[in-house]
Amino acid sequence: MKVLVQTADFDLGAEVRAICGSPKIGAVASFVGVVREVAMTLEHYPGMTEKALEKITREAMSRWQVLDCAVIHRYGELQPGDQIVMVAVASAHRRDAFAACEFIMDYLKTQAPFWKKEGAGWVEARSSDDEAAGRWA
Amino acid sequence: MKVKVLFFASLREQLGKSQEEMELPASVDTVESLRTHLGARGGPFGKAFDGKALVRAAVNQEMAQPGVRIKAGDEVAFFPPVTGG
């Protein structure tokens, strides 16, 4: 399990290869979030962010048969088209991989302390994100 | 008791500060009572901690509901609902 919070970009292919060490792995699901249209600045709560992401990831590993996973979230200044976040989950079978990947993203959206600012305005939280996370309760 | 209070994102900008050390009276011992205590300062604090404002909190870097207890030395953070991902 790998959780990183960083300003640098990431390479999904390299991260996927890195979690595929076990011969038991038969499925890898991954998600990448990308900056849409407008440049943004992402602020976070150093210390709590890492803890929150680790907690969410451990929860996913306890709910599904996950053999390994990687979560990387960037912060700082990001331009349209830049990658923001990635989640990759390796499992024996696809259902566990898909479900755990989606769970981590849904929980991250409501539990990890990141805030997006576009120009002078802060992005408002969406109730649809709370509903998405609520599905897994 | 002494606690460290942090502010993030729009709240940090509204208040013009990212953190402060506070000496709390004995009656202030939960997230909710600290929120009320801060709001009672008036000015930008009154506005930011108005009862209708959407403010989330964390105690010692764990998300915390209004009823969570605060003790000496804790790190308490206030911030708007998160928007990562």
Image (cartoon, coloured by chain):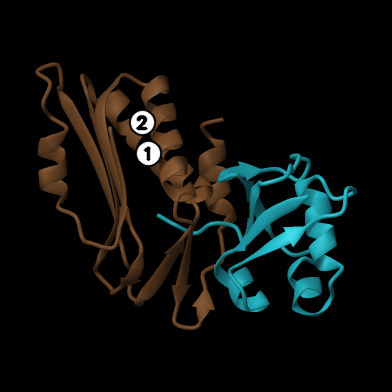
Chain colours: A brown, B cyan
Q: For the residues marked 2 and 1, what is the alpha-carbon distance in whole angstroms?
A: 5 Å
The chain containing the residue under callout 2 comes to A
Left or right? Give the position of A25 relative to B46.
Answer: left
Q: Position of residue B65 (x, y in %)?
A: 71, 43
Left or right? Give the position of A82 relative to A127.
Answer: left
Three-letter code, disc 2: Ala
Q: Position of residue B24 (x, y in %)?
A: 81, 55
Residue drawn where x is 18% and y is 27% of the image: A27
Residue drawn where x is 84% and y is 59% of the image: B36
Q: Is residue A11 above or below residue A135?
A: below
Q: Looking at this view, is A29 or B33 the one in front? A: B33
> Which residue has dot 1 on it?
A102
Q: Looking at this view, is B32 or A87 the one in front? A: B32
In this view, the residue farthest toward the top is A24
> Which residue has dot 2 on it?
A99
**Res A29 visible:** yes
The chain containing the residue under callout 1 comes to A
Q: Looking at this view, is A97 or B70 the one in front? A: B70
Q: Are marks 2 and 1 on the same chain?
A: yes
Task: Specify the quadrant that holds the N terminus of chain A.
Answer: top left
Left or right? Give the position of B3 relative to A120.
Answer: right
Displayed quadrant of residue A80: bottom left
Three-letter code, disc 1: Glu
Q: Position of residue A112 (x, y in %)?
A: 48, 49
Q: Looking at this view, is B27 or A132 the one in front? A: B27
Q: Position of residue B51 (x, y in %)?
A: 82, 62
**Res B51 visible:** no
Residues at marks 2 and 1 touching, judged by CB atoms closer than 8 Å: yes
